[in-house]
Amino acid sequence: MLAPDCLYGNVVFCLVAEVEINKLRTEEAGLRDALLKMQALNEGLGQDKIELNRIIMHLEQEKATLQVCGIFYMLTYLRQPCQNYMDTKILNYGTSYKQRTQAKKSDSLAYFIIFLVPSQFN
C-alpha cells in the first residue's frame, strides 16, 4: 500500500505544480499584454509631445511676428507726429544744410522713425 500512496502523492504534487505553472503563464501573458499597452501609450505620448512642441514653436513664431507687426504699427502712428516735430525743429534751426543736419542729429529717434517707416503706411 505504500507504493500507491507515494504514487498518489506524486500525482497530486505534479497536478498542483501544473496548476501553478498555468497560473504563472497566465500572469506572464497578462504582464506582456500590459507591457505592450504601455509601450503603445508611451509611443503615443511621445508623438503628442512632438506635436505639442511643434505647436508651441509655431505659436512663439506667430507671437514674435505679431510683436514686430505691433511695433511697426505703432511706429506708423508715430511717423507723422515725428515728421511734424522734425519739420518744426528744422524750421527753427534755419534753412542751411548745416542747420538741418544739426536738427536731425539732435533728435535721432524721431529722425529714425521717419525714415524707418515708409510714408505710404501712414
Image (cartoon, rainbow, N blue to C red):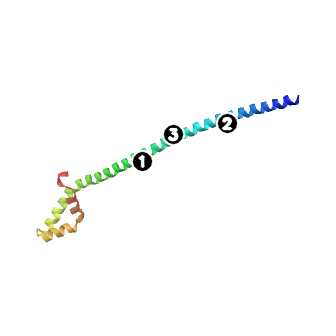
Picture quarter containing residue 118? bottom left
Q: Is residue 104 left or right of residue 30?
A: left
Question: Residue 74: where, in percent of width, then height?
Answer: 26, 53
Secondary structure under badge 1?
helix
Give the residue at mark 2. Answer: 24
Task: Using the numbered discs, state the Cα–Cα distance from disc 2 to disc 3 in whole angstroms.
Answer: 24 Å
Secondary structure under badge 2?
helix
- Mark found first going from the N terminus, 1 or 2: 2
Within-10-Å neighbours for mark 2: few <14, some 14–19, many 20+: few
Figure check: 23 above or below 113: above
Give the residue at mark 1. Answer: 53
**Extreme-left residue of the structure:** 95
Name the residue at 37% across, 50% down: 60
Within-10-Å neighbours for mark 1: few <14, some 14–19, many 20+: few
**Extreme-bottom residue of the structure:** 98
Question: Residue 104: where, in percent of width, then height?
Answer: 19, 66
Identify the amino acid type marked 2: Leu
Within-10-Å neighbours for mark 3: few <14, some 14–19, many 20+: few
Identify the amino acid type marked 3: Ala
Q: Is residue 40 left or right of residue 31?
A: left
